[in-house]
Image (tube, helix red, strand yellow):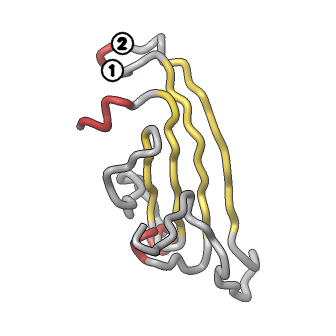
Amino acid sequence: MDGVELLRPIRFSGLPQRPNVIGGPLMFVGKDEVDLSTMPEETRGGRQLSFEAYFLWTSKVVPQEHRGVLTRVNDASGTLFDETFMKYQVAEPTRLRQITAEIFVSHGLDAALNY
């Protein structure tokens, strides 16, 4: 677009290496599918929820706008990275500045696009 290459998911290259116990960045990848049919219909917003996600810890996240978690529903986000990790309470706020994550929801949460 206008000569700028757009990439998704974000490509990670040239991540900083620091002399510490871990030695370098760590990436965790996973997926899950949950049957929500036992929950009340007004609460669940659908019968099924399935998603894939990655979680990257590195000593420094650059650009700073990528610190936090970004949720995509059917490949659309409509928002920026949430630095509070959906208001998750932690005792070490320094760790939050070293993490970037994306959640790709493939089924469920469709109503959240209109919220």
Q: Choose top left, top right, bottom left or bottom right for residue 28.
A: bottom right
Asked if the residues shown at circle 2 and circle 1 are in contact, with their CB atoms under 8 angstroms apart, the answer is: yes
Which residue is located at x 50 percent, y 28 percent? 107
| 52 on left or right of 107 | right
Q: Secondary structure at mark 2?
A: loop
Which residue is located at x 25 percent, y 35 percent? 114
- The relative height of residue 30 versus residue 44 in the rendered view (above or below) is below
Amino acid under disc 1: Thr
- Between residues 57 and 78, which one lies in front from this camera angle? 78
Amino acid under disc 2: Pro
- Between residues 23 and 90, which one lies in front from this camera angle? 23
- The relative height of residue 62 versus residue 44 in the rendered view (above or below) is below
Q: Residue furthest toward the bottom?
A: 19
Can you give x and y, in whole percent of width and height, for residue 37 in the image? 48, 12
In which quadrant is the C terminus drawn? top left
Specify few, some or many for label 2: CA neighbours under 10 Å numbering under 14, 14-19, or 20 or more: few
- The relative height of residue 94 versus residue 102 in the rendered view (above or below) is below
Residue located beneath label 1 in the image: 43
Can you give x and y, in whole percent of width and height, for residue 103 in the image? 51, 47
- The relative height of residue 81 versus residue 14 in the rendered view (above or below) is above
| 107 on left or right of 77 | right
Residue located beneath label 2 in the image: 40
Q: CA distance from mark 2 to mark 1?
A: 5 Å
Can you give x and y, in whole percent of width and height, for residue 83 in the image? 38, 64
In which quadrant is the N terminus drawn? bottom left
